[in-house]
Image (spheres, helix red, strand yellow):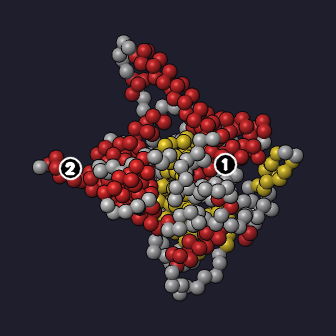
Amino acid sequence: MGVQVKKGRKTKWIPTKVDLDNHIIVPEIDSNLEYPDRFVEDYVSHFTKTPLDQSKPLWELHLLNIKTSDAEAVSVFRIHHSIGDGASLISLLLAATRKTSDPNALPTVPIQKKDTSHQRSSSPFRWLFVIWWALLLIWHTFVDMLLFTFTIFFIKDTPTPLKAGALGVELHNKRIVHRTVSMDDIKLVKNEMKTTINDVLLGVTQAALTRYLNRAYDVGANSNGVKQRSSVLKKIRLRASILVNIRPVGGIQELADMMAEKSKVKWGNCMGYIILPFSIVLYKDPLEYVRHAKATIDRKKHSLEAICSYACAKLVLNLLGVKVAAAITRRVLFNTTVAFSNVPGPVEEISFYGHPVAYIAPSVYGHPLALTIHFQSYANNMTISLAVDPLVISDPYLLCDDLEQSLKLIRDAIQKKHTVDAV
């Protein structure tokens, strides 16, 4: 491990010895607390207004010996983003765990298969298709990067009850809460609609944000009120900044070997951004949210926006320094409404040094957004982790309810469709 030191305009890492007593913290906690879940949330929330000590490696492990509604005890890793991005940090955590069923085996993580259907075509018009595919890729990338640039300078999302209206939101205290839902429900929708897990999660998120804003803009129960509210929602520009891991991700062994000198999967911050527009519309059919999400993300997949945004950020960092690069990133995030991330986790139950893991709930703070949504899969569950600015979103549990209810409505629509087809 190392610490950061400034040399001129640049900040560099220098090796240092790690004293575990300075990093592993076990606070004394009253075992008879009336609201243990609330205590853990308050404990984590306190981190968002206290910086890490720069004189030692930028990480801490807090062991809270308190039983909550989800676990017998809670471990909180607090790690500075300069050490690595979400993929790096989750991979480090998973590399330190083992399957509960086999203490000597690393956990299994799902591997996304690349679509090579266009490469296998034997049609005589194959080359025409490839040329058209490449031209569309260039055009989509150009349009996306143009909109990305415009977002830096002047395109802003509509002010809503989900978006901070003033600068300085990154300095506010954050509230971090989570909710766990069943992966079986998500996989049911995925399989029936022939989409990906990510498509389903984006559809659920769109439905939940629509429910939340529909309630916030409730102007009356009469028909005119409903029409007026629907009109307001349709005019909302709401976009998500989505973090994309641009590494050629392999299995857990490749992730575990990230820090090796010749590893193909590199440690650090290797992520690009894409800006994804959300549809804030009151659909009668809940499945429309998933269909719309799939169409939007399929279009984004046929673009190099994530790779180009990463390359541009690296170029600006090398030429103009970290302050300019940080200012540009801050502008992009502040002009959107929500940060969204979906990280696949182990497909079976795991243990951390002999202790069974009940759930994994990653989050982040210090960026200029009032709402950040992380989805983290683990075994047969999906944990939804929200980081909110309580000055903007006073009741994050209500938004958790909306996410859970939206998934239920989409699942019920699939089951209802099955019943109708069977009849």
Residue 22 % position (x, y): 74, 69
User: Judging from the image, what secondary structure is the residue with disc 2 in?
Assistant: helix
Q: Residue at x 73, y 63 (%)?
A: 52
Q: Nearer the viewer, residue 119 or 334?
A: 334
Q: Earlier in the sequence, mark 2 or mark 1?
A: 1
Q: Is residue 383 above or below residue 259?
A: below
Residue positioned 65% across, 64% down in the render: 172
Where does the image place residue 413, in percent across and percent down from the top left? 27, 53
Foreground: disc 2 or disc 1:
1
Q: Residue 353 — which label?
A: none
Q: Could you say whether the residue bearing mark 1 is in a helix, strand or loop?
A: helix
| Residue 26 in view, yes or no | yes
Which of these two is toward me, 381 or 332?
332
* Residue 112 relative to residue 318: left or right: left
Residue 412 image-quadrant placement: bottom left
Residue 246 rendering spot, x and y as whole percentages: 57, 39
Q: Disc 2 designates what residue?
A: 418
Dot 1 amino acid type: Arg
Q: Quadrant where the N terminus lies?
A: bottom right
Q: Residue furthest right?
A: 8
Left or right of residue 340: residue 44: right
What is the number of the mark on residue 330? 1
Q: CA distance from mark 2 to mark 1?
A: 46 Å
What residue appears at the point 46 percent right and 23 percent down from the top-left corner? 133
Q: Residue at x 39, y 53 (%)?
A: 228
Compared to residue 408, the image places residue 394 above or below, namely: below
Check disc 2 and give the amino acid type. Answer: His
Most extreme residue toward the top, as rendered? 124
User: Crowding at label 1, few (<14), some or many (≥20) Cα neighbours within 10 Å?
Assistant: some
